[in-house]
Image (cartoon, coloured by chain):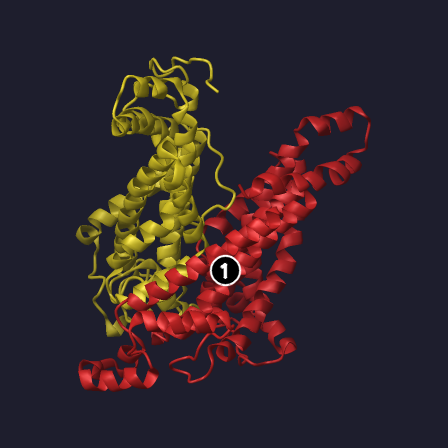
Chain colours: A red, B yellow
Amino acid sequence: MTMLHALFSRVLSLFLVLCVCFFALETLPGDACTAFLDQDARDPELLQICRANLGIDQPILVRFGEWAEALMRGDLGTSLTRDRPVSEVIAPELRNTFLLALVSAIASVPLSIILGIIAATRPGSRLDMTLSAVFLIAMTLPEFIIATCMIFLFAISLQWFPAVTIVPTGAPVLDMLPNIVLPVVTLSLVMVAHTMQVVRSRVIGILESDFIEACWLRGFSYWRILFGHALPSALPPALNVIALSLASLLGGVVVIERVFNYPGLGTLTLQAIHDRDMPLVQGVVVVFTLTYTGLSLLADTISTLLDPRAGANNHA
Amino acid sequence: MLEPASITDGAVGSADQKGLNVNSSPKRSFQKLLRIILSTPSGVVGFGVVAAHVVVALIAPAIVLHDPLAQDPNQIMAAPSWTHPFGTDLLGRDVLSRTLEGGRVAIAVTALSALLALIGGAAIGITAAMRGGWFDSLTMRLVESIGALPYLLFLLVLANAFPGSAFALVPALAIFYSTSIVRVSRAAALSVASADFVTAARVRGEKAITVLLREVLPNVLDVVLVDGALRWASMLLGFSSLSFLGFGVAPPTPDWGLMISDARNVMAIAPWAVFWPCVALSTLILGAIFLADAASKAVGLQRAPEGLNP
């Protein structure tokens, strides 16, 4: 029941977001024609012809109806400047961004859990302080400064990896791999920075609790307490927060892709915004919001599955 | 719920440790917060760094040696020297002057937005907590929905619609970054709303607005200010990212994010043109975080695990 309720409230939220997104994007001054015609946009006749050609001369409510109706069928519309369906434009870029995010997540989630546990078992030690300091800095500095440092260190000074991605969008995954090392390292660093502290504080909190005290008194071994009792209770809430911070790091992907010139959704977004290609921008917003909603639903599911008590009060 | 009385501040408040001061005024709670912040090393560092940055930003036009916009074709990407201590950039402009002036727009825009977010967010959050009912549910659902928006994309679109005017972003920045302030102030107000002195004020027949301003606000202000400081740091991060992407401050106005993005491609030849704006921006954000961190420890608050996201 709670799962259904959560799903329903997420879908409602998603619908609201998409409506806000449509009207906010459509009511802002400037459209694809003013961007495309540039100086010529001062000629109202040309502007009118261009808008009629692209079908954006209709009243906003008519366009909203068409857009929403098409969205229900899973159709994101047609890109104004590329003359191709939005889904077709987005798909290859999405694959690249997904690859980047997936590899980073595979690297950073286990790493943040391991580092979090290590730091939590020795709170206040020199190792703990060093890890905290490094990741505090990684968490607070803008992604583009971290990325710039990475490029300076690994691409210019050491010359281990290329500074920018030099493969085309549709390249096979294997060709992409050597090029994504630096973006993945940067993204993973930021992800670990955001999630390690969560794991650390949860594990510390559990280790100080009464039932761990009881385990000690019953004479359980250290490892049995840590992995058999402390972790199973500490991880569900931590995983929940990890999934949420991964979702909120989506914006950082745009910056990181730009720094490394990576052919992905972020780079596409910047171009679409620059061209005022609203269907494309809306398509990207839909993808980003869906991912966010999916991840936060995943976060809830994880915590409900691993800890049935959480289900009851999570969706109040 | 109430802690034992403490007389550290000479206040009559029954729960000074939890920040429940019956007799405190906004000004006093601010002064007290500042005093506690300045009693910790990280607080002193954070406050010092932020204050230095703000002072430099204010007086920069008076102290720069060169015009930050002046291009010298004979001094393109010149290494640091006595005339140009930080070197020059791709167009032969003095990096020191540009770095000194590079924070002005970012600090002004984010400070204004943070102030707006603080006032608006606290007003909405406290009202939601005090009124409850449909207003509360609506507020929380809205806050949730705004949190699900890809805010960076929206800011980019907005910046693109109003090119060249960074201040057009102020309302949007304030809205996106106020969600956490709404949540924090609502939670803090909820914990105060059931306190005896609030009930007493209500029973006395005070108007709702008086109860809110005189009884509740002073007791949640420190927590809200702390979150406001964090949001400010977070806005600096977001705004400099916008500038870096070319959607924030318009060239040729000096701005750190823009300077880094411009000089990035010649990093191998003129690393100083990237290095100094990076140092300036990093120290300001870290300083703001230190300040907020010391402040949150001072009011006994655990920092949100999500960190810097709005």
Residue A156 in percent (x, y) is at 51, 68
Where A239 falls versus A71 (above or below)?
Answer: above
Where B102 falls versus B191 (above or below)?
Answer: below
Residue B184 in percent (x, y) is at 41, 38
Looking at the image, residue A185 sits to the left or right of residue A17; the answer is: right
Where A209 falls versus B46 (above or below)?
Answer: above
Question: Relative to the observer, which residue lies in front, B159 or A129?
Answer: B159
Counting the numbered discs, the total is: 1
The quarter of the displayed image where residue B231 is located: top left
Looking at the image, residue A117 sits to the left or right of residue B24; the answer is: right
Provide the secondary structure element on which disc 1 rests.
helix
Question: Relative to the observer, which residue lies in front, A56 or A146?
Answer: A56
Q: Give me the residue at 34% from left, 64% from top.
A: A23
Q: Give me the residue at 49% from left, 41% from top.
A: B304
Looking at the image, residue A89 sits to the left or right of residue A66; the answer is: right
Q: Is residue A212 visible?
A: yes
Provide the residue designation for mark 1. A250
Q: Give me the residue at 48% from left, 20% from top.
A: B1
Q: Give me the residue at 53% from left, 54% from top.
A: A8
